[in-house]
Amino acid sequence: MKKWVMVLLCTFLAVILVSCGKKAISVDLTGHSSLLSGGNEQDDSEATASHITDGTNRENWPDTGTAVTGSDNADSGAAQEQASASASDDNAEKNDFNAVVLDAAMHSIVLQSEQGHTLMFELPDDLDTSGIASTGIVIGEAVEVKYSGTIHGTDTSEATLTQITTSSKTLSVPADSFLCGGFMILGVENQDLQSVASECSFPMTLDGATIASTKEMKKLDREKVFTSELVTAVSGVNPFDLKMSEDGKILYGGTHGFVIQKSGSSDDAAWYVISILP
């Protein structure tokens, strides 16, 4: 009898232990389940809501009076892409202008156009230069340029050179004068005192005052040298309108500008800036 009582007691205890064990495991899994799904879903939801709120400022939205839906956005985007494609096709028509070469490198060229714009172009591998002399493109040369695409002011990022030939228009000043005058245009546009000083013959005059040396020029207030009037006048120079005076001086600009002159009468004499009129 005692033996059966002991068996019953043991069986009862085993059932209790198994039951308690299952409950513990169930609670443990429930806890992990909450961390892996429910907890993250809540965090993600809050993070997404916060991101949308922070990233969308209604004050910057245009007031169209109508709500823009997802399909409206898609239709609008498609229309814009179609319009851009059409515009690109229209801009692909070739254009041309006359200019003077201010600087030339292996893969790029800087031109001063007859419209008074300084333009920098990359030189494509298939550029047609058959109309240029065998000596190649040189600084101070008058050229006719053909391109495809569009030029916005002085922005040539949407244009591609297709052909460069010798221009039918002639210059009234020596081509080698642009070795000084061309670099001065670039120096003034970039408001670079060091570059400008390197093109000057000292002593020279600045707004009537004598500047004795490069060192003295570099100490000058850039804003007083590169006035908006000077930059505008020099940047807008049409190289085909330049004239040389009887004493060999060339004025770039007008009331505001700079004057260059050759240092001597020999063929190898260099051109230098002798006066700046800011």
Image (spheres, grey):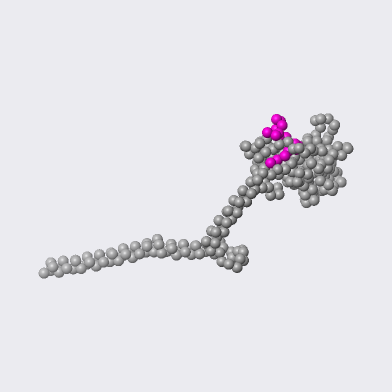
Where residue 95 sits in the image (x, y, percent)? 69, 44
Q: Nearer the viewer, residue 263 or 176?
A: 176
Q: How many marks?
A: 0
Residue 141 picture quarter? top right
Where residue 60 sits in the image (x, y, percent)? 61, 63
Where residue 158 sits in the image (x, y, percent)? 64, 47
Where residue 97 sits in the image (x, y, percent)? 72, 43
Q: Residue at x 33, y 65 (%)?
A: 27
Residue 55 picture quarter? bottom right
- Which portion, as a residue range, is magenta? 130-146
Q: From what the image shows, is residue 126 above or below residue 11?
A: above
In the rendered image, residue 138 lying in the magenta stretch gets the answer yes
Q: Residue at x 87, y 46 (%)?
A: 208
Residue 175 picture quarter? top right
Residue 75 seen by the camera? yes
The reply, left or right, for residue 195 in relation to residue 33 is right
Residue 101 seen by the camera? no
Q: Residue at x 66, y 40 (%)?
A: 162
Q: Quadrant of the N terminus?
A: bottom left
The reply, left or right, for residue 96 in relation to residue 56 is right
Q: Nearer the viewer, residue 116 or 87?
A: 87
Q: Residue furthest right?
A: 246
Q: Residue at x 83, y 38 (%)?
A: 261
Q: Nearer the viewer, residue 119 or 52?
A: 119
In the rendered image, residue 159 lying in the magenta stretch gets the answer no
